[in-house]
Image (spheres, rainbow, N blue to C red):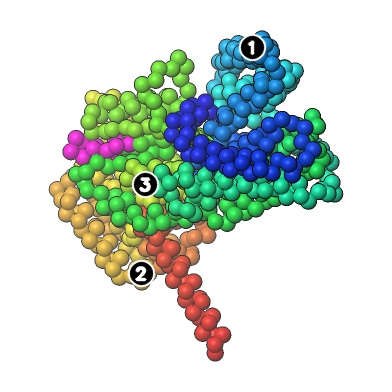
Amino acid sequence: MDKAMILRTVKKTWNVSMTVLLVPLIISFLVAHMLRDHVPRINLKRFYFYISFLASRSSFAVVVDAISELKLLNSELGQLTMSTAVIHEILGWLNSILSQLMRGGLQRILVVHVGAVCALSIFTIIVLRLMIEWIIRRTPERKPVKDVYIIAIMIGAITLGFIYEGLNSNYMIGAAMFGLVIPAGPPLGSALVEKSELIIKNFFLPFFYIRLGQLTDIHSIESWRSFLALELILISAYLGKVVGCILGLISFKASIRNALLFSCFLNIKGIIELMHFLRWRSRKYVDIQTFSELVLSNLVLTAIVTPLIAIFYKPQRRLESIARVDNCIRTLRTTLPSSELRILCCIHHEDNVNGIITLLRATNPTEMNPICAYPVHLKDLAGRAAPVVLPYNTQKYKLASNATDRIMRAVIKYSRSSGPAVAVQPFIMISPYDTMHQSICRLLKDKFIPLILVPLFPNGEVQGPNGTLHNFNINILHYAPCTVGIFVDRGLNSCINTAKSAKFCYNVAVFFIGGPDDREAMALVSRMSGHPGVSITVFRINLEENIVENESEKHIDEVVMNEFVASNFGNASVVCRQIVANDTKQLVSAVRSLERSNDLVIVGRQQAFSSQLEEEMRPWVEYEELGIIGDLLASADFVGGMMSILVIQSVESVQGATHKTVKTLGNLIYNYSTSSWR
């Protein structure tokens, strides 16, 4: 758990969290009070309050694990559910501590429990925290934590649990307090998860469920009156949570559908609740029938709500609708040349920074045509329970800097040296790469950003575990509600000195064949053409065999080229060349004839190819996200693999491909139905 997340959650979602907890708690407790005589064999005082509270609250560990399995960590309801579960978790700890203290008399409360808990808390926060910080300082950056430290921390967590259990308290509180002291994420948090995950999931959990199954006896359910009474208490809590979610989301102006789905998220039960039941059974607070009923109820409830979430909650569809509705304001061509150009820059590690800054500098930012950069340092979710999307605090002083600090300092330094022409709003995003595009698309929508730059690592370089960065790039291309630039950086600093007084020298080549993506590339090049240090060469390739079905697209291509030539008439830094290619072989030869003197090549991801030309070239594509021409330029044998490439995709081309697919499916259905009728 992230300590900063707890503070943010308490400030923002406390009203919703308390509503979805108190409403089912009150309803179920009233039902339990009315049916208290029909549930016998209960040896625990205030049992009805405990069972009502446990059924009404949501466990953070259970909810996060379930949302992660459903790949909904970055969804809006997933984020709200985790924030709500954090507050419920804190209240659960307080309830557990108070319930343990209230079992004894006043002297025992003051002398034994409070003194021991305070002493252990101070020891954990001060002594153990200093030891953890010492371990982190002794671990070099990008180096693994020593195994002896990992083993010592695990033994320490078990020891604290034993001490709390010996004080007649809950052992989970001791381990949880120790966990809160450990910083989330690498190097230590991720190392603990990696080292302990194998033995926990493959050894401890199976034996736990085996023991749970041994103690659960369906045949012990003999009194159906007590069975129905306990089920009514539990069902009242579950339905009360539905009512609480509807009341709690009124302030967010959410729909009833989202409120019902939110209640399904919060009604997910798991190992934490089962541990409480097992604890009650081992201490003989409940009999075997009540224990079996509680276990089976949780099992049935989770088996119902989890498929409902998977079937009815599809955040991807909303991303697609955003891309369809907002495309009119999310392209470079629709952004006025005299207005501020907003660019979101994805950064995976420090090697991306220099190329991104150089590319921003080449876009010709001035006081009349400023740019606002949103650098986002992307990190995989490791050693954390919940994803994080936060603005980077530029005012916070740190004794030791990490990779994020160095990245942001470089970008901020460039912004300050550029004066009012460049503004920077840095962000940090820690999330699973499978769903990271959801948070990025929301940021693009909220900030009205028309261009996002995403780095690519070709030629066998690091692509993340199991190619996750490749999947991330594909998701961005598919769901981004704006223009996407896939940036292959081969070192753009060969002709550039970052000093303010140094002359900026930059050579750019552009291939224009036709289509929405090539037109977006020309819109970016049009901004670059005003920079005195940028030399641009535009290659207008005419394909003799390329018969485009849509003549209006061809006309728009001609208009874009004519406007570019007219606006740069007399500009000695801009050169336009015509190239005629009769077939695929001549097209490849024309692309490969590019000189080595260029620093950057800009090309559209999809061109207005005929189907025959596309079929001939598609089998040779290695990187799907670069398209046909972009993949050809990024190959290692193209000018020795020393030239940087920027592949542009317009949101219009994504919609065009979707409409084309729908049209093709419609024709197939029509032909099939016609042949069947015949």
First of labels 1, 2 by sequence position: 1
Query: Could you tell whether 606 is left or right of 49 in the image?
Result: left
- Comparing labels 3 and 1, the label whose residue is closer to the camera: 1
* Residue count near mark 3 (Cα–Cα under 10 Å), binned few <14, some 14–19, many ≥20: some
- The residue range painted magenta reads 361-373
Give me the residue at 62% from left, 51% from top: 305
Task: Tell me, for residue 445, which label it has, or none.
Answer: 3
State how far apart marks 2 and 3 are (Cα).
33 Å
State how far apart marks 3 and 1 are (Cα).
55 Å
Asked whether residue 314 is in view, the answer is: yes
Residue designated by label 2: 548
State how far apart marks 1 and 2 are (Cα).
85 Å
Q: Amino acid at mark 2?
A: Val
Residue designated by label 1: 110
* Residue count near mark 1 (Cα–Cα under 10 Å), binned few <14, some 14–19, many ≥20: few
Q: Is residue 199 above or below residue 535?
A: above
Q: Amino acid at mark 1?
A: Leu
Dot 3 falls on a residue whose secondary structure is helix
Q: Nearer the viewer, residue 146 or 455?
A: 146
